[in-house]
Image (cartoon, grey):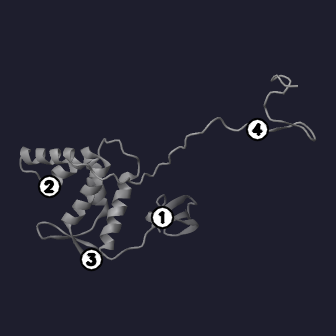
Amino acid sequence: MHCPYCNYIDSRVVDSRNAGEEGIRRRRECQQCGLRFTTYERIQTPALMVLKRDGRREEFNRDKLLRSLRLACAKRPLPSGTLEKIVQDIEAEVQSLGRAEVPAHIIGEMVMKRLQRLDRVAYIRFASVYRDFQDLDSFKAEVETLLNHRVEEEPLPTPQLTLLPLEGPPPRKAVWRGPGRRRTGLPKKSQAGGR
């Protein structure tokens, strides 16, 4: 592994941990300059070929898919990491088909289904390129279908944490006042109308 700073060929692994879908995260230290950098290792699956409409065959490219999703979702209010998660899901679904060759329209429909649930504007943007509308009427028909069709509400995973609402005030902290006596922050009985 070449050092990205000094291009030295030898480095040692300082830390390794599982990074979920991304594979294995390795923290490395260059043996020459001593600087540290991170690498990710993923299991390489057999090459999956995509059969294009014009008959060409092309290797599945997750970066190309991510680029097209980013174009469709440009300036849309989406949680960070959502598009990467969609690409991972689509890649896993395509791999699970167990075929060496997958027609491009199957991948396109997977993208359309997810974008329709995620963001309707991004869906229309993607559909306008993917379906290659020839005139304004076919584009208008797609928009009307989208407006009249209720999309099944299946929540998409979000990589962000949500805060839980607090129920009531936080508990008071007990204060130590010597053996047998504790003060809890509550008023004394004599001050509250008691003995």
Q: Which of pointers 4 and 2 indicates the residue nearer the eye?
A: 4
| Cβ atoms at labels 4 and 3 below 8 Å apart | no
Q: Is residue 51 above or below residue 151?
A: below
Q: Which residue is mark 4?
A: 173
Q: CA distance from mark 1 to mark 3?
A: 24 Å
Residue situated in front as seen by the camera: 185 or 37: 185
Residue 48 can be seen, yes or no: yes
Q: Which residue is mark 1?
A: 20
Q: Position of residue 19 (x, y in %)?
A: 50, 63
Residue type marked 1: Gly
Is residue 83 rendered to the left or right of residue 104? right
Residue type marked 2: Arg
Q: Which of pointers 4 and 3 indicates the residue nearer the eye?
A: 4
Q: Position of residue 187 (x, y in %)?
A: 80, 27
Residue situated in front as seen by the camera: 82 or 193: 193
Task: Categorize mark 3 by other alpha carbons within 10 Å: few (<14), some (14-19), many (20+).
Answer: few
Q: Which residue is the extreme one toward the front?
A: 194
Task: Categorize mark 2 by other alpha carbons within 10 Å: few (<14), some (14-19), many (20+).
Answer: some
Q: Label 3, secondary structure: give it.
A: loop
Q: Earlier in the sequence, mark 4 or mark 3?
A: 3
Question: Looking at the rendering, which quadrant does residue 12 occupy?
Answer: bottom right
Q: Is residue 185 above or below residue 13?
A: above
Is residue 72 rendered to the left or right of residue 192? left
Residue type marked 3: Arg
Q: Which residue is mark 3?
A: 99
Q: Which residue is mark 2?
A: 131
Q: Position of residue 15 (x, y in %)?
A: 58, 65
Residue type marked 4: Lys
Q: CA distance from mark 4 to mark 3?
A: 62 Å
Q: Is residue 60 above or below residue 129?
A: below
Q: Residue at x 30, y 69 (%)?
A: 94
